[in-house]
Image: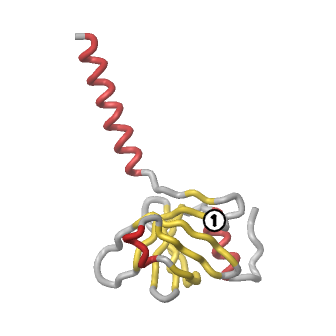
Amino acid sequence: MNSGVVLIVLGVVFVIAAIVAFGVEPHWSSRDGRHFIARAAHFERDGSPSWVEVRGSVDHGSILITARRRRHSHLDGTYHLARTGESSRRTTVAFLRGSQDVLLRLPRHSRTLEAMTATANPDATPSD
């Protein structure tokens, strides 16, 4: 009977951990904000975006994006920041223009977002 209770408690803990893990936004940013991992989607005026995990780098006003999976390679390319806007769940969505339009979802206080806006507007001074 005692091992049954332990098994149930472990099952509940596992379910709670899985729910929390699926709710966490995957994002990594280097110290200078020039390299990152985030979620991106092809911009479609009709319908909801399908978010996939991408790697990227910010370099001299351009943003290079590479999808982590081969089936999402249609997102690969070089883009420029067109605008940013706040989204739900404490995130900011960056609208990127290139050979196609792409949405990039980042945390609101991301170093990558600061690096993107600084390279899009070279007159701005980055905040520390």
* Quarter of the rendering occupied by the C terminus: bottom right
Q: Foreground: 84 or 40?
A: 40
Residue at x 31%, y 18% (from the top left corner)? 6
Q: Position of residue 88 (x, y in %)?
A: 43, 64
Residue at image mark 1: 35
Which residue is located at x 38 percent, y 38 percent?
A: 17
| Residue 91, horizontal then vertical, whole percent | 49, 63
At label 1, counting other C-alpha atoms closer than 10 Å, the crowd grade (few under 14, some 14-19, many 20 or more) is many
Is the N terminus in the top left, top right, bottom left or bottom right quadrant? top left
Q: In which quadrant of the rendered view does residue 107 lie?
A: bottom right
Element at badge 1?
Answer: strand
In the displayed structure image, the side of residue 73 where residue 113 appears, left or right: right
Residue 126 position, x and y percent, is 75, 70
Three-letter amino acid code at the position of disc 1:
His
Examine the rendered structure and indicate whether residue 98 appears above or below residue 103.
below
How are the colours assigned in the image?
secondary structure
List x then y, in percent, for residue 72. 40, 72
Q: Residue at x 58, y 81 (%)?
A: 81
Question: Which residue is at 49% across, 77% downward?
Answer: 76
37 vs 8: above or below? below
Who is closer to the viewer here, 20 or 35? 35
